[in-house]
Amino acid sequence: MKTITTHITRADQAANPYFYIPFDVPAGTTRIDVTLAYPKAEDCIIDLGAFDPRDSGYPTTEGFRGWSGGARDSYFIATDDATPGYVHGDIQPGTWNVILGLYKVPEAGADVTVTIALDDTPRKLEPQPARTFPVRHQAGWYKGDLHCHTYHSDARGAPELLHAAAKQAGLDFLAIADHNTTTQRRYFHPQSSPDLVFIRAMEVTTAVGHANVFGVDDWIDFRMTKPADAHVLESLVHDRGGLLSINHDKPTIPWDYDFPAADCQEVWQSTWLAWNWVSLERYQQRLAAGMHLSAIGGSDYHQPDRLLPEGPLVLARPTTVFWLPELSEDAVLAAMKAGHGYITESPDGPHLEIRAGDTVMGGSVRNVTEIAVHAKGAPGDRLVLIDATGPLADLEIGGDDWQTTVPVAPQKFIRAEIVAAASRPDLIAQFTAALDGRELPWQLKGADLETQPIRRALSNPIYIET
């Protein structure tokens, strides 16, 4: 056993938000145990992780052995098993590193103690789980959640509980984007099925921005330290055939890096009242600037240690809905990139579809003179059509299954929103009931509940060719 104590300062944090404590591992080691101790406080939060000798520095493709952020103070890595968030397997001899994320360091600094224990008891060498390729051979609208967490990062709930929550919600696909790790695949790879397809994902999590990586089995290096590293991230993802999405670009963790060549933007995270109008406005600005960027939504649900009933603050709020030729991971990823779908408030939320002739959401077209709209489940609410200049039309939705054609002359793109009108009192009542007497979260004010427009569904844009 080895104990290392070091004093960490704000100068260390300014030099690099990632601090490394090296230690030597001899050949024949089959298990490593690490414990972190420091004076936790509001102004002192230190994250925890591990790299083996193959780490070549940012950006590396090898050597990552786990990350638990601030959720854990200890971990083990063995040849046959590991703490959730950490990668079991061969333990290479050489210099390993405990990595500390210096999220918050007090003005006076902090003493940090790391205790390391090594063991050479014979153990099996367990392989990593193999990816599976389930398919449901039927075209149609399919619904899912593209952002949620298990105890492989900072949620309390096991993958089995999240799986049960997804089935309870009636989802067809689910992306589990644990923070800075992919070890949730131990459960989700073998459990993916035609009934519920699991999408490979990871949330790149830093102090100044979060992004989701989709469709990549490899771990992606998250150790970004400067604005231009966003372009390193885009290369790491796209070189592996994955998709990159910018997450919850709003308070309290907006995207403060350069804006990369992203495929998607998460324009709706959790209940609409969680400041999503900020994300939507930034998305609108990017579309108006000429970007083609698919809109997606995700609950960012952190599964608790019990299965909760359905409600406005649980999994699949919001739900992303795609038209797919079949249900498979490849089909979901293609629809995400193309924008062939919409976001709605819940698994049974309003349906929203727009077309320009034969051109569907996410497509491009010339000479648009009218848009066909199909909305279901929102009678008495408002249908708003928007282009690069702002709202073009605002109509009352005239029935539960409502179709209309609207004459338009849009610039750059056209997209649609369903805004609560007749449904607003019920939506506010459901939200306040879910708080169960607690104060308004996220620094919301009573005035926000009274005045903020509540979107119930958002379409992807149709782009106007010039």
Image (cartoon, rainbow, N blue to C red):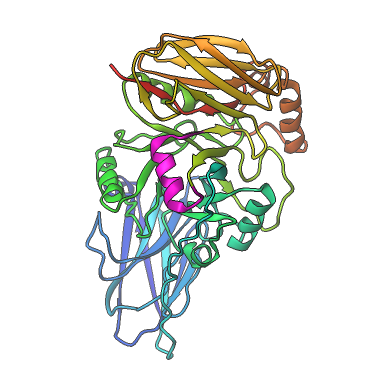
Any magenta on residue 135? no
Nearest the camera: 222 or 289?
A: 289
Quarter residue 33 falls in? bottom left
- Residue 361 in view, yes or no: yes
In the image, taking residue 278 as reference, residue 337 lies left or right, namely left
In the image, taking residue 127 as reference, residue 297 lies left or right, namely right
Magenta-tinted stretch: 326-341
Quadrant of the image containing the C terminus: top left
Residue beneath the point at 50% across and 60% down: 134
Q: Position of residue 380 (x, y in %)?
A: 71, 16
Q: Position of residue 282 (x, y in %)?
A: 42, 24
Quarter residue 349 falls in? top right
Instruction: Relative to 270, say whether 48 is above or below.
Output: below
Instruction: Relative to 307, say whether 429 is above or below.
Output: above
Quarter residue 94 falls in? bottom left
Instruction: Relative to 128, say whether 387 is above or below.
Output: above
Residue beneath the point at 26% across and 64% down: 55
Residue beneath the point at 29% across and 44% down: 234
Q: Position of residue 123 (x, y in %)?
A: 44, 87
For the stretch drawn in magenta, the main secondary structure is: helix
Residue beneath the point at 51% across and 15% down: 385
Quadrant of the image containing the N terminus: bottom left
Nearest the camera: 114 or 287?
A: 287
- Residue extending furthest toward the left: 56
